[in-house]
Image: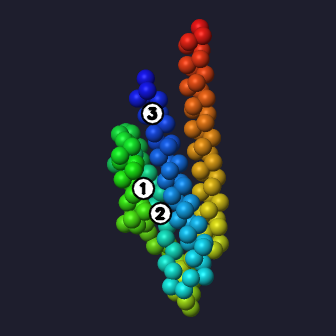
Amino acid sequence: MQNRLTQALDFQTQALTLRAERQRLIASNIANADTPGYQAREMDFANALRQATGRTTPAGALTATHAAHDAAVTSLREEPGLLYARHSQDAVDRNTVDLDRERASFTDNTVKYEATLRFINGSVRSMLEAMKSHTQG
């Protein structure tokens, strides 16, 4: 039974961890908006999530393990999976941070992070209610 509970939440847990990593990345871009020569970075979230969950395609079967998840986050921190953000306008100091884009990305990612948390909370509540009903009935 524990494996089923773990598997049910594994995907959302991995998504939450990757969202937190993306938030850190966006915050770093914003913090370096005035750093000459700084190259803004971004994450291909969908691809990172597929790698973390072991999916080869978005519609594939979930075969993730915690080790796969840890490896995906580690590779993001080491930066091979990160992309350079496209900048809309060349800056004299070669900084590619677009504050408007970064703020919008930060807000969008925050909303999705909170939605993932709510989904996890709802799933846990549902499972607890199901277990209560079974043991009390």
Quadrant of the snapshot with the C terminus: top right
Of label 1 and label 3, which has the lower sequence position?
A: 3
* Disc 1 element: helix
Residue 122 x %, y %? 61, 34
Q: Which label was assigned to residue 73?
A: 1
Q: In the displayed structure, would residue 95 be above or below residue 120?
A: below
Residue at 45 percent across and 33 percent down: it is 6
Q: CA distance from mark 2 to mark 1?
A: 11 Å
Residue at 51 percent across and 74 percent down: it is 40
In depth, the one of 88 and 4 nearer the eye is 4
Q: Which label was assigned to residue 43?
A: 2
Q: In the displayed structure, would residue 133 be above or below residue 12?
A: above
Q: In the displayed structure, would residue 82 be above or below residue 128?
A: below
Outermost residue, top side: 137
* Disc 2 element: strand
The residue at which mark 3 appears reads as 6
Quadrant of the snapshot with the N terminus: top left
Q: Would residue 136 be visible to someone looking at this image?
A: yes
Residue at 39 percent across and 43 percent down: it is 66
